[in-house]
């Protein structure tokens, strides 16, 4: 794996600061709608997620959609609405940028720039956010290996931006029951490979509202530094991805469960492996191990 700046080492351990948050030290809970639709919608959802415990507000002003006829976002008007909602609630905001030409002025409104899954290997865009001076949330491409994903993070780091957070949002497999297959093994694997904080997005990872709470808790148990959840007060009227948006009451209940789980995880004892138990290291002779 040809990574240098993203590779894990003692000197590179650092937090990524977004507003008053520090990814890697604080547990970051990003929430908000898939798309910014109106002033009233954004204000209502921002208030609901803030009161429930979110500390980062998400919302899409530009939406890359599979169909050219689907809602593409409000653009500049959406950015202004998102920024106002975040300031009203005292929350930093994260939003996606699609084009390298848009990076400088999108950075005027957003505290964190998101690179979506479809743009993970848009190298011109990666170079530009590397120069932008804003923290970057880099989502994993739907067909990307960990090595390919980290190489894209390396582009951002190489072009001068040390503040990168990786976001696992599911990969494409042969399974069709869920929108994607959420790869939670990526969380501990990345913590071994890189110093960059790791976020998990169970909303895109499943695409199914009823599966989101369980996969969110699983992500926390796997060691995620942050989670990102879509929330909408009227998901049946959402202009995009209503099926994977939690209602505010569902989100609030999930936040309470996250807090309980994190408290329990902190109390787990650190038990060293028993050298007499076997199975704690590599098999030097590469022999098949058989349990008697």
Image: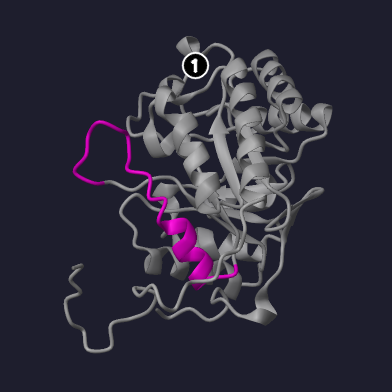
Q: Residue 70: in sight, yes or no?
A: yes
Q: At x 56% / y 76%, what residue is drawn?
A: 8
* 79 left or right of 203 in image: right
* 140 left or right of 39 in image: left
Question: Magenta part mainly helix, strand or loop?
Answer: loop
Quadrant hosting residue 29: top right
Q: Reply yes or no: does residue 167 show up in magenta.
A: no
Q: What residue range appears in magenta?
A: 173-195
Q: Quadrant of the N terminus?
A: bottom left
Q: At x 32% / y 30%, what residue is drawn?
A: 67
Residue under label 1: 238
Residue 57 on image: x %, y %: 68, 35
Residue 98 on image: x %, y %: 51, 46
In-front residue for pair 55/101: 55
Residue 148, placed above or below residue 74: below
Q: Reply yes or no: does residue 183 show up in magenta.
A: yes
């Amino acid at each position: 794996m040809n990574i240098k700046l993203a590779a894990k080492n003692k000197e590179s351990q650092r937090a990524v600061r977004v507003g008053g948050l520090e990814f890697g030290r604080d547990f970051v809970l990003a929430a908000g709608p898939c798309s910014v639709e109106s002033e009233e919608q954004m204000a209502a959802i921002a208030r609901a997620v803030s009161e429930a415990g979110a500390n980062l507000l998400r919302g899409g002003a530009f939406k890359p959609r599979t169909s050219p006829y689907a809602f593409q976002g409000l653009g500049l008007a959406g950015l202004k609405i998102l920024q106002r909602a975040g300031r009203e609630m005292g929350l930093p905001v994260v939003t996606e940028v699609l084009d390298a030409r848009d990076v400088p002025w999108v950075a005027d409104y957003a505290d964190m720039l998101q690179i979506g899954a479809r743009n993970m290997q848009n190298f011109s865009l990666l170079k530009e956010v590397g120069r932008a001076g804003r923290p970057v949330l880099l989502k994993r491409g739907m067909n990307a290996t960990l090595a390919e994903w980290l190489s894209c993070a390396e582009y951002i780091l190489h072009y001068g931006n040390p503040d990168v957070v990786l976001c696992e949002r599911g990969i494409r497999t042969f399974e069709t029951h869920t929108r994607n297959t959420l790869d939670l093994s990526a969380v501990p694997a990345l913590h071994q490979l890189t110093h960059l904080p790791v976020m998990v997005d169970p909303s895109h990872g499943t695409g199914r509202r009823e599966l989101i709470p369980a996969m969110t808790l699983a992500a926390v148990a796997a060691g995620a530094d942050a989670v990102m959840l879509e929330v909408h007060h009227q998901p049946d009227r959402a202009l995009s991805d209503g099926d994977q948006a939690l209602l505010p009451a569902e989100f609030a209940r999930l936040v309470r469960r996250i807090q309980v789980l994190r408290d329990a995880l902190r109390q787990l004892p650190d038990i060293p492996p028993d050298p007499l138990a076997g199975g704690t290291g590599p098999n030097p002779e590469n022999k098949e191990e058989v349990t008697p």
